[in-house]
Amino acid sequence: MGRAPCCEKTGLKRGPWTQEEDELLIEYIKKNGHGSWRSLPKLAGLLRCGKSCRLRWTNYLRPDIKRGPFSPEEEKLVIQLHAILGNRWAAIAAQIPGRTDNEIKNLWNTHLRKRLLSIGIDPQTHEPTAISGPLKRPPASPSTRHMAQWESARLEAEARLSMESSLLLSPSITNKRINNTANADYFLRIWHSEVGNSFRSMNKVVCSSPASQASVSGTTMETVHKPELESELKFEGKSGHFYTGITHSSSSDEVEDSSDTALQLFFDFPGQNDMSFLEAHFN
DNA sequence: AAGGGGGTCAACCGCAGACGT
DNA sequence: GACGTCTGCGGTTGACCCCCT
């Protein structure tokens, strides 16, 4: 099926936004909400396409956006989330309050990716690079890959739920959003179903996720992996973001399949250069 | 002081999925 | 179910800035 262009290309302004345009957009959304992005520019008196307005708002003008450089903790979180979620910037951004997917994508492409490469970690797989990497590990096994996929889907579902719970407090909540929550629930239901259970037991992993019963007023999420995985992921707080704590097992060679998860590989690489913020985990 | 090169980041593009009719 | 529209997402681009020579 054909797809109509998002806007007429002629007569519309492109490129950097002026302060006047920003003010018009903020003013309009404050008064009316964004409603339909397509019709917004006309109503707000802007010579921009709706897509451009949406981007400007979500990536720059939104009041809850945190400007300024990323803290070491945020950078660490981005790397850890990327190890689990891959290039799903929106899912990663959902876990880092005040940061946009665009910001995180830029951070990754300009800083973090290069840092990982410089210490011999493949930024895409989070595994040591084949030849020159300081660490040599076999590639993750198929079941580990499956585990990562499960974990990825579950994390995204929980991220959405936590986001929904905060959105429900907003007057602009829509039916569509509620439907998305149902979709997120779908993953969680699978995760907590027999299928999920058998999968978890197969991989010797215990996961508890109160988030699946998350209330509207607040979300608390906690996922505890067995020590074999040597890591724990925790969701925390009202805003639903999570932090990751790591504990190390002294008998790593007892660990078989689970020890080579992408996440594990990341946790294992030595702290050096600019990655010094990770050093605490190796003490 | 000039200009070349690399880094950064806001903005754009196009695709895919969700949704409405 | 088919079709048209809207929105969100990830990849890419290009303008701007800074540093080095």
Image (spheres, coloured by chain):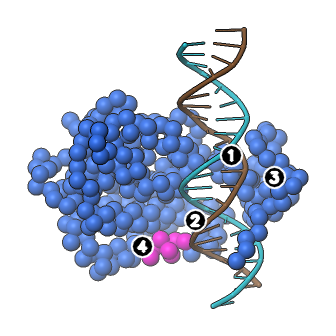
Chain colours: A blue, B brown, C cyan
Q: Is there CB contact under 8 Å for labels 1 and 2?
A: no
Mark 3 or 1, which is nearer the eye?
3
Toward which corner of the image does residue C4 lie, by quadrant?
Answer: bottom right
Task: List x then y, in percent, for residue A12.
Answer: 85, 52
In the picture of the structure, the residue carrying the numbered disc 4 is A187
Neighbourhood count class around disc 3 (C-alpha, 10 Å): few under 14, some 14–19, many 20 upward: many
Same chain for mark 2 and mark 3? The answer is yes
Chain letter for mark 1, please: A
Which labelled disc corresponds to residue A48? Answer: 3
Chain letter for mark 3, please: A
Toward which corner of the image does residue A256 lie, by quadrant?
Answer: bottom left
In the picture of the structure, the residue carrying the numbered disc 1 is A61
Toward which corner of the image does residue A128 lie, by quadrant?
Answer: top left
Q: Is there CB contact under 8 Å for labels 1 and 4?
A: no
Q: CA distance from mark 1 to mark 4?
A: 32 Å
Q: Earlier in the sequence, mark 3 or mark 4?
A: 3
Q: Amino acid at mark 4?
A: Phe
Q: Secondary structure at mark 1?
A: helix
Neighbourhood count class around disc 4 (C-alpha, 10 Å): few under 14, some 14–19, many 20 upward: many
